[in-house]
Structures are given as structure tokens and as C-alpha cells.
Amino acid sequence: MAKHRIYTTSFASVYPLYVAKAEKKGRTKAEVDQVISWLTGYGSKELEAQLEKQTDFETFFAKAPEMNPSRALIKGVVCGVRVEEIKEPTMREIRYLDKLIDELARGKAMDKILRKE
């Protein structure tokens, strides 16, 4: 089976869309970066390096320093699909990020987005 097109799409090409979605709803680029860092373990310099390298989504998640174990707590629907039911690991990670950005744009409190007690 052929890979989904998003796997070979550069993360840097979608990142500005994440930021724009958040900013349109009164959130900040720093909050988007915080969400990405929480999910993947990338620090700000590492994230910037991935953006500069035009790293594709598959590589971005495969090389993530430390995927947050609490990401399994992310539940809900993104693009009509329940994230917790996605079997393919890379697609699930991408949809986790999509869900976090959606929650940020909807005005959810950062502690809830980052699944803090």
C-alpha cells in the first residue's frame, strides 16, 4: 500500500497553518510551540532546525527526541476519524498533533491540552 501523502509533506509547510489557526483564535506561536514540544520532546532550537531542514512529517515524528507517554490520553475526532482508533502509528501521531492544535484554537486551557492533572 502506498504511503499517505502527508508523510512526505514537509512539516515546515504545515507549521505556519498551525500557527495561523491558533493566532486567528487569539492564541500565540509560543503556545503552538509548547504543544509541539510537549508532544514530541523537541526544544525550541531543535524545532527550528527541523523547520529549516524542511523535514517531512514521517521523519519529524520518527526522530522526535521523546514522544510524551501522556499522548495516549488524547481522545476525540479529527477529520471525521477517532484518533484513539487510528492503527498506523505515524498517522496517529500526526492526528494527535492536529487534535492538540484544534483544542488550542478552541480556547481550551493549556493545562487541559497538555493533559496535566
Image (spheres, rainbow, N blue to C red):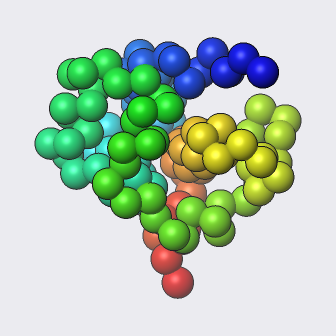
User: With respect to residue 68, does 48 lie above or below?
Assistant: above
Where, by quadrant of the figure, is residue 62 drawn?
top left
Q: Position of residue 65 (x, y in %)?
A: 32, 54
User: With respect to residue 69, does 43 lie above or below?
Assistant: above
Q: Position of residue 86 (x, y in %)?
A: 78, 47
Q: Position of residue 36 (x, y in %)?
A: 40, 47
Residue located at (71% from left, 43% from top): 88
Residue located at (64% from left, 65% from top): 72
Q: Position of residue 97 (x, y in %)?
A: 54, 44
Q: Would you say residue 26 is visible in this rendering?
A: no
Q: Residue furthest left?
A: 45
Q: Residue furthest bottom?
A: 117
Residue located at (57% from left, 63% from top): 71
Image position of 11 (left or right of 91): left
Quadrant occupied by the N terminus: top right
Residue located at (54% from left, 70% from top): 70
Q: Nearer the viewer, residue 60 or 96?
A: 60
User: With respect to residue 79, does 108 lie above or below?
Assistant: below
Q: Residue furthest front?
A: 1
Q: Would you say residue 97 is visible in this rendering?
A: yes
